[in-house]
Structures are given as structure tokens and as C-alpha cells.
Amino acid sequence: MKQEEEKSNTIISNLVNKYGLKSVVFENTEKNFRTFKEEMRDLVKAQKENARKGCPDMPFDYRDVGQFQFELLFGSDILVFILHTNVFEFDRSHEVRRTSYIVEENSRSYCGVIKIYNFLSDSFKYDRLNDIGYLVARIFINKENHYYIEGKREISQIYNNFSTAVLDQDSIREIINSAMMYSINFDLLAPPYENIVEVTVEEMQEYMQNTRMRTGKRLGFRFQADSTGGAF
């Protein structure tokens, strides 16, 4: 009976400790997500007039979609920032787990996650539900506000040492700017002719009625993680 009670107490103790840790991590990640929102609002406010000088009709707007999402509409692109509601731990095979920073204290490997996706603005404008978006970056943030980025090209070039990198306003601005630059340079390409030579009557009717033919910047091409970025 005593052994069962000790086992039960151990379970409760572990539960309380783990839940407490995850709560701290999520609260810190949510706080940083609010800073991302503030920096994005400031960016749009400061640059909106400049962005439209050369092209008055070009979209350049910030949208607050709620507690866990906001969007930047710029030109023909949308960046969607999403705060995941769960806390994750790095996989045991991940390079971060082998650093002295994690080896010394494993709780540092628990992170909240902010994801950045790139979509075509027309996908939302015309309600093209089958269109493709691409994950540009994942930002992992732990209880001590250290961060690690898995991302594409420009974003992967950001200083990225989890042991020493602390998320602040400057690094958040750099992440936002790099995500925008990647999206601008990631152009819409026509798929190979052979991939679209056939179309069904249903697809054509749906296209004519709703303009919903599936579109993505690399539709018809194999899209993989860049050699300098992380895998998704």
C-alpha cells in the first residue's frame, strides 16, 4: 500500500513539475508573439507610405487575426504568423540536444513554437481553399528566452546559436525582415507543361465558377528544404 502511495505521489509530482515548466515556456513564447505583433504593426505604420509611393495600389497591411495569429499582406504575398498552443521538446537526435547548454539542464530543451507561412495573397482574396502555402520558418523559444530557428535561405542565415541567442526586439525585427525578403525572392513559377496538359470537366467548371484552380509558388515542382535551412 505504501509503495502504491509513493508511486502515486511521484506521478503527481512529475505532473506538477512538467505542467509548471510547460506553462512558463508557453507564457514566455506568447509574450514574444505579442512583441512580434507590435514590431509588425510598427513596420507597417512606418513603411506603408514608402511602400506605396512607387505603386499606389500595392497592398501593404497588417491584420490581427486573434491571440494566436496575425498576417502581413504585402504585394502579392501574405505572411501568416501562428503561435502554436503546445510546448515541444527537441528530438533526441537533434543537434541542439548535444550542446552543453541542454546537457547541463534538460528543461531548457522544452520550447514554444512560432511558425511563419507564406501564401499568395490571391489565395485568400479569391477563397482558393486548395492553394498551397509554404512553411518559411519555425522559431523555438525556451523558458530562458533563448531561441533557435529552422528556416529557409535568408532566415537560416540569422545568427542561430541556441546556447547564447536570446530573443529581443532587434532579432525579432531581423526575423520579420528576413521572412519578407525570402517571400519576395521566392517567385511564382509556372508548372511544367506536362503536369497540366489534362484537366477534368469538373475542374474547369469549378475554375470558371469560383476561380479555384489550385495554385502555389512551386506547384508541380518538388519543393524541399534548402541545403542551408532546416527540414520541415
Image (spheres, rainbow, N blue to C red):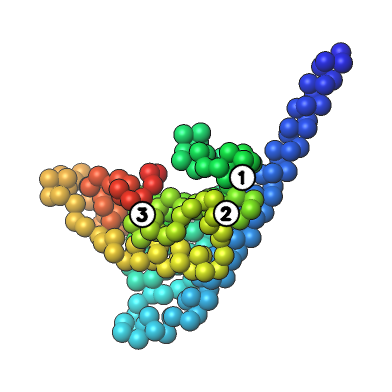
Residue 123 seen in render: no
Residue type pointed to by label 1: Arg
Residue at the farthest top position: 1
Tell me if mark 1 has few (under 14), some (14-19) or many (20+) residues whose alpha carbon lies within 10 angstroms of its own. Answer: many
The image shows residue 66 at horizontal and vertical percentages of 58, 61
The image shows residue 193 at horizontal and vertical percentages of 12, 50
Sequence-wise, the earlier of marks 3 and 2 is: 2
Q: Secondary structure at mark 1?
A: helix
Task: Compare residues 80 and 126 and report the one nearer the observer.
Answer: 80
Task: Compare residues 31 and 64 and report the one nearer the observer.
Answer: 31
1 vs 3, front mark: 1
Tell me if mark 2 has few (under 14), some (14-19) or many (20+) residues whose alpha carbon lies within 10 angstroms of its own. Answer: many
Separation of marks 2 and 1 at Cα, in angstroms? 9 Å
Q: Are marks 1 and 3 in contact (CB under 8 Å)?
A: no
To which residue does mark 1 refer? 108
Sequence-wise, the earlier of marks 2 and 1 is: 1
Separation of marks 3 and 2 at Cα, in angstroms? 20 Å
Residue type pointed to by label 2: His
Quarter of the view holding residue 102: top right
3 vs 2, front mark: 2
Q: Secondary structure at mark 3?
A: loop
Q: Are marks 2 and 1 in contact (CB under 8 Å)?
A: yes
Q: Residue at x 21, y 57 (%)?
A: 189
Name the quarter where the N terminus is drawn. Answer: top right
Residue 36 seen in render: yes
To which residue does mark 3 refer? 152
To which residue does mark 2 refer? 146
| Horizontal side, residue 85 vs residue 180: left or right | right
Which mark is drawn over residue 81? none
The image shows residue 179 at horizontal and vertical percentages of 40, 62
